Image: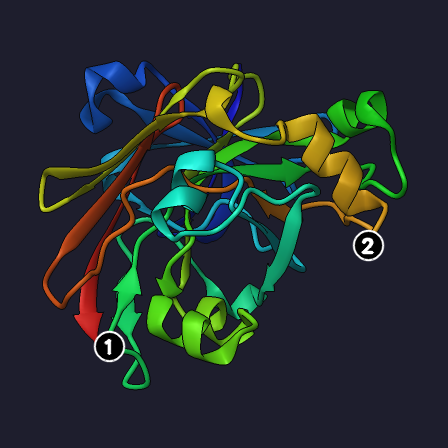
Amino acid sequence: MVRIARFVHPGGMSFGVVEGDPDAGAQALTVRAINGHPFGELDLTEQRYALADVRLLSPILPSKVIGVGRNYADHAAEHGAEVPKEPLLFLKPSTSVIGPHDIIRLPEQSHQVEHEAELAVVIGATGARRVDRAGAEKAIFGYTIANDVTARDLQKSDGQWTRAKGFDSFCPLGPWIDTAVDVSDAEVRCEVNDEVRQLGRTSQMVFDVPTLVSYVSHVMTLLPGDVILTGTPAGVSPLVAKDVVAVRIQGLGELRNPVAAR
C-alpha cells in the first residue's frame, strides 16, 4: 500500500509518500518527499516531515474531472429520477478542485448548494483510450475521496449541469491517493457538523469502477492524473456558511472542508 500526497513544506511543494498508521491519528503520520511526479518508480528523498507540520493540497491536479450521475439507485430515487441504462457523464473543470481544509465557497447565484460524498478514481501513467475492463483496471493509479459539491437549484433550472457542478471550490479532493486500497465494498459516509447525512457502500454502485473507466475511455481519452467521480449515495442536503463537511471512505481516511459565503 502506498499513499501519495501533494503538500507544501518549507522548501516548496512536493509529492510525497505518507507513512504510518492513519488509525493512530494525524500526529502519528509522516510524509516523505519524492522527486518529480508519483507515476512510475518512486524516487524517494531523505526529506521527511510530520504530517501535522505541512499543508496538504489536492493530491493531484487533473486535466479534467469526469462525474457520473445517479450511480446509486437510492440517490436517483431521492430526486425522483430513473437509474440510467448507461453511465450518465458530466464534467467538472480543473479550476473546481481544492484540497483538504480548503474552503468551499457558496456562490451568490445559488440558494441550494449540496454535498455529495464520492469515491474518486485517479488514472495512472498509461492513461486510457478505448480500454476494456482489464485495461481499465490496469489504467487505475489509485483512489481518493471527493465531494462533488452541487448547486442543486441551478442544476434543476439549467437542465444541463455545467454551471451547477463547475463553480470554483466545488470539487474537494484528498487527503491522499491510495494505490492499493480495496474499494469493492467500502463504506461512504458524509457528516456535516458531526451529523451523519450520507451513509452507503461502494458495492451499491449501479456501474462498478472498471465499467466506468472503460465506458469513459470510449468517449474521451483519459490522461494521467485525470479523475473520475463514481457517484453518491442518498442523503445529499444543503450546506450553509460556517458548516464543516467531512467525507470519509473506508480505507481512505477523511476529507474535511469548511464552508463560507463567497
Residue 42 visible to an observer of this rendering: no
* Horizontal side, residue 99 vs residue 199: left or right: right
| 135 relative to 150, above or below | above
Q: Of the residues under marks 1 and 2, which one precedes in the sequence?
A: 1
117 and 101: which one is in front? 117
Q: Position of residue 258 (x, y in %)?
A: 19, 57
Q: Is residue 85 left or right of residue 49?
A: right
Label 2 SS: loop
Relative image position of residue 130 (x, y in whole percent): 90, 41
Q: Between residue 114 and residue 34, name the one nearer to us.
A: 114
The image position of residue 240, as x and y in percent, is: 15, 65
Q: Viewer-nearest of labels 1 and 2?
A: 1
Residue located 57% across and 31% down the image: 206
Q: Residues within 10 Å of mark 1 (few under 14, many from 20)?
A: some
Residue at the (64%, 51%) spot, across then down: 88
> Which quadrant of the view contains residue 213?
top right
User: What amino acid type is highlighted by mark number 1?
Assistant: His
Using the image, determine if residue 77 lies above or below residue 244. Answer: above
Q: Residue at x 47, y 51 (%)?
A: 81
The image's mark for residue 111 is 1
Q: What is the total number of numbered labels drawn onto the structure image?
A: 2
Report the colour scheme: rainbow
What quarter of the picture does the C terminus occupy? bottom left
Q: Which residue is mark 2?
A: 220
Q: Amino acid at mark 2?
A: Met
Residue 186 point in image, percent of width and height: 42, 19
Dot 1: element? loop
Please name whichever residue, 19 or 214, is drawn nearer the observer in this view of the structure. 214
- The quadrant where residue 155 appears: bottom left
Looking at the image, residue 33 lies above or below residue 258: above
* Cα gap from disc 1 to disc 2, whole angstroms: 33 Å
Q: Residues within 10 Å of mark 2 (few under 14, many from 20)?
A: few
